[in-house]
Image (spheres, rainbow, N blue to C red):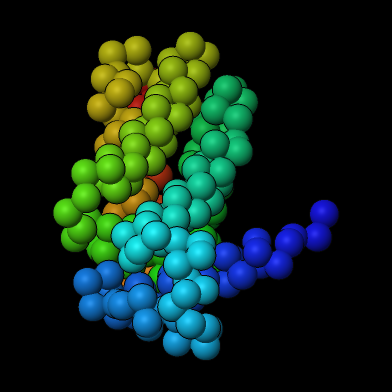
Amino acid sequence: MEPTLATRRRNEILEAALKVFSERGYHAAKIEDIAAELEIGHGTFYRYFKNKLDIFNHVVDDIVRMITELVTDINPHEAETLDEYRQQLDMIGDRLFGLFDSNPSFSRIIFYEAFGIEDKDLRERIQGVFDLIGRYIELYLENGIAKGYMREDLHVKESALAIGGALFEACKRVVSSSDPERDLVVWKETIITLIIQGVSKR
């Protein structure tokens, strides 16, 4: 179905806000900067969003949704062997790295700007996506334990959060690298090797 004019305008404002926030930073950015990016008046902006924090929250929500869809789209119960689990990790890494590589502004918003804002709800929302992905990674580990190719003594929750943290740290480093293609290969190889060695049944 064709989006309405209001929907298109709202999306245009969100895209302009993403650009302005990533280039100027949240605190330096102003509503007039976003309006000027689209050559619209302040009144048009306020028809769609209450204030600067409101539109920043919507920008974050869009990024969080994309990250969540990429990670949760893979069936965590599918892997029957450690090698198949390695392939799943490789796919997750490619998806996350691909998202941040094709949208460098996402990295600045999620990893830097969002944590510099004193807003409890925003911080909880960002933390929520890390926790959600951690819980999803738990399903991969529980599947591996149930099918006998992962250690039964794993601290599943803590291991899952550590894996998620490593993946996001790698994304942050690769996006800001002077040689992202090389570093992508190195980071993926490093993380996957460490994970496989740590979780595999001895």
Numbered label tally: 0
Left of 195 or right of it: where is 6? right
Q: Residue furthest right?
A: 1
Quadrant housing the N terminus:
bottom right
Left of 99 or right of it: where is 55? left
**Residue beneath the point at 56% across and 43% down:** 69
Quarter residue 164 falls in: top left
Q: Is residue 146 above or below residue 33?
A: above
Quadrant housing the C terminus:
top left
- x then y, percent, for residue 195: 35, 37
- x then y, percent, for residue 116: 19, 60
Could you say which is closer to the camera, residue 176 or residue 195? 176
**Residue beneath the point at 65% across and 61% down:** 7
- x then y, percent, for residue 81: 55, 25
Left of 85 or right of it: where is 1? right
Could you say which is closer to the camera, residue 17 or residue 46? 46
- x then y, percent, for residue 73: 60, 38
**Res. 165 visible in picture:** no
**Residue beneath the point at 32% across and 21% down:** 156
**Residue beneath the point at 37% across and 82% down:** 32
**Res. 68 visible in picture:** yes
Quarter residue 60 falls in: bottom left
Quarter residue 4 falls in: bottom right
Q: Is residue 94 above or below residue 18?
A: above
